[in-house]
Image (tube, rainbow, N blue to C red):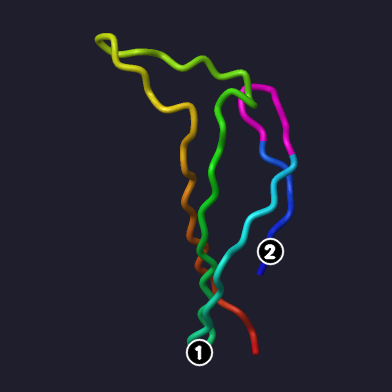
Amino acid sequence: MTIIGNLSFHGVTNKISVYAQTSLKGNKMKVEGSFPVDLKEYNILIPSLLGTSIKDEIVVKFTFAFDVNQ
C-alpha cells in the first residue's frame, strides 16, 4: 500500500509518499512502514555534540494497529 500525504515539521509542510505493509488477522489490522526525512528540507538546524555532527536525515518508523469490522 502507498500512503500519500503531507508531513509538517517546524512550520514547513512537504508532500510525502510512503510504502507501507498491511496485515490482517481476524479483525485486527496492522499497517507498518518507515520513511526518511531530510531535516534540511524542514529548516531544522543540525546541532553538533562535542564536534560530532548528527546526520541530516532521520528515519521515521510507524505502526498502526486497529480493529476492523468484517
**Residue for point 52% across, 62% down:** 64
| Marking on residue 66 | none
Q: Which residues are magenta?
A: 8-14
Kindly give the residue lying farthest to the top in the view shown.
51
N-terminal label among 1 and 2: 2
Q: Nearer the viewer, residue 24 or 2?
A: 2
Kindly give the residue lying farthest to the left in the view shown.
50
Q: Residues within 10 Å of mark 1 (few under 14, many from 20)?
A: few
Type of amino acid under label 2:
Thr
Q: Residues within 10 Å of mark 2 (few under 14, many from 20)?
A: few
1 vs 2, front mark: 2
Tell me if 48 is positioned left or right of 46 in this view.
Answer: left
Type of amino acid under label 1:
Gly
Q: Quadrant of the C terminus?
A: bottom right
Image quadrant in which you'd find residue 69: bottom right
Q: Nearer the viewer, residue 62 or 15?
A: 15
Compared with 61, 67 (above or below) is below
Q: Quadrant of the N terminus?
A: bottom right
Residue 12 point in image, percent of width and height = 70, 25
Residue 5 point in image, percent of width and height = 74, 49
Dot 1: element: loop
**Residue for point 51% across, 64% down:** 32
Dot 2: element: strand
Residue 11 painted magenta:
yes
Tell me if 29 is positioned left or right of 15 in this view.
Answer: left
Compared with 34, 59 (above or below) is above
Q: Nearer the viewer, residue 6 or 39?
A: 39
**Residue for point 58% across, 64% down:** 20
| Marking on residue 2 | 2
Query: How far apart in space, not on screen, are marks 1 and 2 (Cα)?
Result: 23 Å
| Marking on residue 26 | 1
